[in-house]
Amino acid sequence: MRVQVSRLSNGVRVISETRASVGCSMAIFLNTGSRFETHETHGATHFLQHLAYKATEDKSHFMMTRMIEKLGGHVAAGASRDCITFAGEQPRASAPPPAPPARPGMP
C-alpha cells in the first residue's frame, strides 16, 4: 500500500492510496459540520448532505443511482458534527482509467 499526500493549486489537500484490490473507492471529506453552524445557519450541514441526492436537468436521482448500481457500485453521503462526506465504490473492472496523481503546484 502506498499513501501520497499532495495539495492542489487551489489549496485542496488530496490523499491518495494505491493498493491491490478488486474494487476502487473515492471519498470527499469537507472540513465542516454542524459544530460550525450558527443560529442563522442551523441545518445547513444536513441540507448540503442531501444535495448529493438531487437530480440534474437530464437525469433523475433514480436514474443516476441505477446507473452506478448497474456497474456494481454504490454511493453514500453523510454528515456529522465535524464533516460532510460524499463517497462511492465500485468494482475495479467497471471503473474508468485512473487519473494521473495530483502534484503540488499543478494547474
Image (cartoon, grey):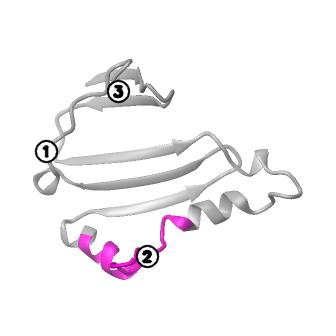
Badge 2 amino acid: Ala
**Left or right placement of residue 69 versus residue 51 in this view:** left
Q: Estimate how packed mark 1 is, as few (under 14), some (14 to 19) or many (20 or more) residues with alpha carbons within 10 Å.
A: few
- Above or below 59: residue 76: above
Return the x and y of residue 107 as percentages of the image width and height: 34, 27
Return the x and y of residue 42 as percentages of the image width and height: 81, 60
Instruction: Give the number of the mark in front: 1 or 3.
Output: 3
Q: Which residue is mark 1?
A: 97
**Left or right placement of residue 10 versus residue 93 in this view:** right
Return the x and y of residue 54 as percentages of the image width and height: 48, 73
Distance from label 1 to label 3 (Cα)?
Answer: 21 Å
Instruction: Give the number of the mark in front: 1 or 2.
Output: 2
Q: Is residue 70 magenta?
A: no
SS at circle 3: loop
Task: State the residue lying farthest toward the top.
Answer: 104
SS at circle 2: loop
Residue at 74% across, 52% down: 34
Q: Which residue is mark 3?
A: 107
Badge 1 amino acid: Pro
**Sooner in the amino-acid sequence: mark 1 or mark 2:** 2
Task: State the residue lying farthest toward the left.
Answer: 93
Return the x and y of residue 20 as percentages of the image width and height: 17, 35
**Sooner in the amino-acid sequence: mark 2 or mark 3:** 2
Q: Which residue is mark 2?
A: 55
Instruction: Give the magenta-colored segment's residue range.
Output: 51-67
- Above or below 69: residue 35: above
Distance from label 1 to label 2 (Cα)?
Answer: 26 Å
Distance from label 2 to label 3 (Cα)?
Answer: 30 Å
Badge 3 amino acid: Pro
SS at circle 1: loop
Instruction: Give the number of the mark in front: 2 or 3.
Output: 3
